[in-house]
Image (cartoon, helix red, strand yellow):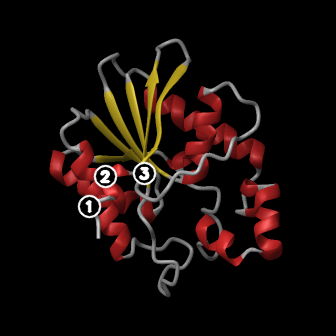
């Protein structure tokens, strides 16, 4: 089967109403539309999303185009799901200093998660997503940077999490080989954003 992982569009980090779970900003909504245009003709059979607002809102554009419902699987959420304020990797990198150093040393811990249990949760979400799917299924999963990195590291047989740079609204493709193995087809496709103002 084909598994397509989409990182959510850019959220509004300054949202006052829900700083812990912000909605997409205007650019993020355009990224969601661009991802939907890319994927709408690929014969998708199912759409799955993290419960966090930024991922679900990114999924909505594609779900509307295809007339598919969005299934929520909790453990596709980001490690920061319990934090009081969303801070993107890009923001942390730009600010630099001690916070960025601490993030680099332990990104999942910095975001508020326990690395071992978070990894187990993401791999459980992956297993739940592919369970009982046919070889011809094509499933889109709208998720976050850390879960995508965990899945890629798992697919490549790496014990530690490799930090692949996955941009907002990017697409990463895998093939589930049916025996617990995964092949990586592409990482961080962003060409569909070149027409996004």
Q: Residue 192 got which mark?
A: 2
| Mark 1 secondary-structure assignment | loop
| Mark 3 secondary-structure assignment | loop
Q: Which residue is mark 3?
A: 170
Q: What is the x, y in percent for residue 44?
A: 25, 35
Which comes sooner in the sequence, label 3 or label 2? Answer: 3
Q: Which residue lies at the image location 47% right of the left edge and 85% below the top edge?
A: 17
**Quarter holding the N terminus?**
top left
The mark closer to the camera, 1 or 3, is 1
Q: What is the x, y in percent for residue 47?
A: 32, 42
Q: Which residue lies at the image location 42% right of the left edge and 51% below the top edge?
A: 170
The relative height of residue 80 versus residue 24 in the rendered view (above or below) is above
Q: Left of 132 or right of it: where is 123?
A: right
Q: Residue 1 got which mark?
A: none
Q: Which residue lies at the image location 31% right of the left edge and 30% below the top edge?
A: 138
Callouts 3 and 2 close, C-beta under 8 Å = no
Characterize the local packing of mark 3: few (<14), some (14-19) or many (20 or more) Cα atoms within 10 angstroms.
Answer: many
Q: Which residue is mark 1?
A: 195
Distance (Cα) linking label 3 and label 2:
9 Å
Q: Which residue lies at the image location 26% right of the left edge and 43% below the top edge?
A: 39
Could you tell me if residue 88 is visible in this image? Answer: no
Label tally: 3
Q: What is the x, y in percent for residue 51?
A: 46, 56
The relative height of residue 121 versus residue 55 in the rendered view (above or below) is above
């Amino acid at each position: 089967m084909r598994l397509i992982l989409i990182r959510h569009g850019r959220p509004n980090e300054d949202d006052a109403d829900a700083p812990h779970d912000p909605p997409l900003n205007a650019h993020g909504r355009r990224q969601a539309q661009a991802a939907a245009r890319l994927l709408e003709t690929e014969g998708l059979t199912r759409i799955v999303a993290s419960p966090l607002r930024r991922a679900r809102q990114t999924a909505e554009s594609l779900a509307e185009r295809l007339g598919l419902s969005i299934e929520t699987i909790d453990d596709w959420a980001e490690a920061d799901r319990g934090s009081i304020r969303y801070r993107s990797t890009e923001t942390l990198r730009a600010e630099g200093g001690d916070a960025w150093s601490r993030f680099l040393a332990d990104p999942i811990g910095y975001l508020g998660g326990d690395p071992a249990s978070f990894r187990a949760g993401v791999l459980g979400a992956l297993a739940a997503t592919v369970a009982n799917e046919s070889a011809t299924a094509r499933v889109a999963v709208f998720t976050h940077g850390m879960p995508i990195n965990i899945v890629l590291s798992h697919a490549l047989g790496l014990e530690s999490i490799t930090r692949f740079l996955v941009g907002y609204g990017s697409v990463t493709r895998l093939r589930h080989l049916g025996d617990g193995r995964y092949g990586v087809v592409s990482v961080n496709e962003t060409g569909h954003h070149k027409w996004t103002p």
